[in-house]
Amino acid sequence: DAGVIQSPRHEVTEMGQEVTLRCKPISGHNSLFWYRQTMMRGLELLIYFNNNVPIDDSGMPEDRFSAKMPNASFSTLKIQPSEPRDSAVYFCASSFRYSGYTFGSGTRLTVV
Amino acid sequence: GIQVEQSPPDLILQEGANSTLRCNFSDSVNNLQWFHQNPWGQLINLFYIPSGTKQNGRLSATTVATERYSLLYISSSQTTDSGVYFCAAETGANNLFFGTGTRLTVIP
């Protein structure tokens, strides 16, 4: 398996623009997680899905953030409109029951 | 949520030295993982170890669930071991809580 695949690897956008991050989990994994990493807050969970259903989105910072998982092999995290404070590395991870989490390579987002 | 504390926060080793990293957690866990974040930012899963001991090459990990701690051993360290080591714990709510990490620098 190719692991968890995220795209793009880097994204630079202007404040106010819409940003869409993409994730393909490992085949067979039934849970998918979106994390954000910043120097100030470390790694924090934004939202997770179980069997494509959003279970807990309490970590989503505000209404500008939304996430979808239309099928078992694809998820998106959208920020609209983006702000400079959204600059961070966004990780997607997937897991299956007690196998542990596997993380993608992350998307480094810079909002100028 | 569960509190995860790691020590030491920073560690500098001479190549070839051994080290032990510690992770304390505040509640019973059903998932305890160790990750290595390399200098390129990638999070590599090292161990899934809610209890017991596992070994993988020069690395091994032990979790004593009843005493709420886990240890990561690195033997014969190499410069490629440099990076940040994270411990992360989950109590069953499908939220993996991360510690603040141990930044390891291995010098040749």
Image: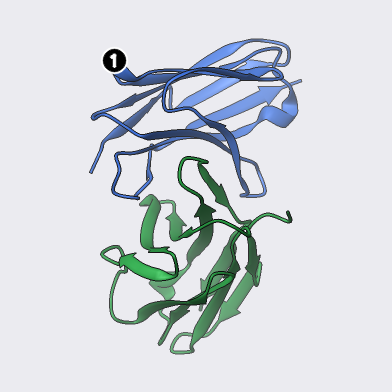
- Residue at image location 35% in from the left, 50% down from the top: B94
At horizontal 67% and vertical 23% (from top left) the residue drawn is B106
Q: Which residue is mark 1?
A: B67
- The foreground one among A111 and B51 is B51
Q: Quadrant of residue B4?
A: top left
- Total label count? 1
Residue A108 percent location from the top left of the image: 58, 65
Chain coloured blue: which letter?
B
Q: Colour of chain A?
A: green
In the rendered view, tell whether residue B85 sits above or below residue A68: above
Horizontal relation, residue B55 to residue B6: left or right: right
The answer to which image quadrant residue B22 occupies is top left
In the rendered image, residue B20, in percent from the top left (x then y), is placed at: 52, 14
Secondary structure of the residue carrying tag 1 is helix
Placement of A64 over or under A50, stated as above or below: below
Q: Chain of mark 1?
A: B
The image position of residue B84, as x and y in percent, is: 55, 36
Q: In the rendered view of the protein, which quadrant contains the N terminus of chain B?
A: top left
Q: Is residue B87 above or below residue A17?
A: above
Seen from the viewer's position, the closer of residues A9 and B107 is: A9
Please give left or right for residue A92 compared with residue A85 in the image.
right
In the image, what residue type sits under mark 1? Glu
Please provide percent x and percent y for residue A102.
Answer: 57, 48
Neighbour class for label 1 at 10 Å: few (<14), some, many (≥20)? few
Residue at 46% in and 46% down: A97
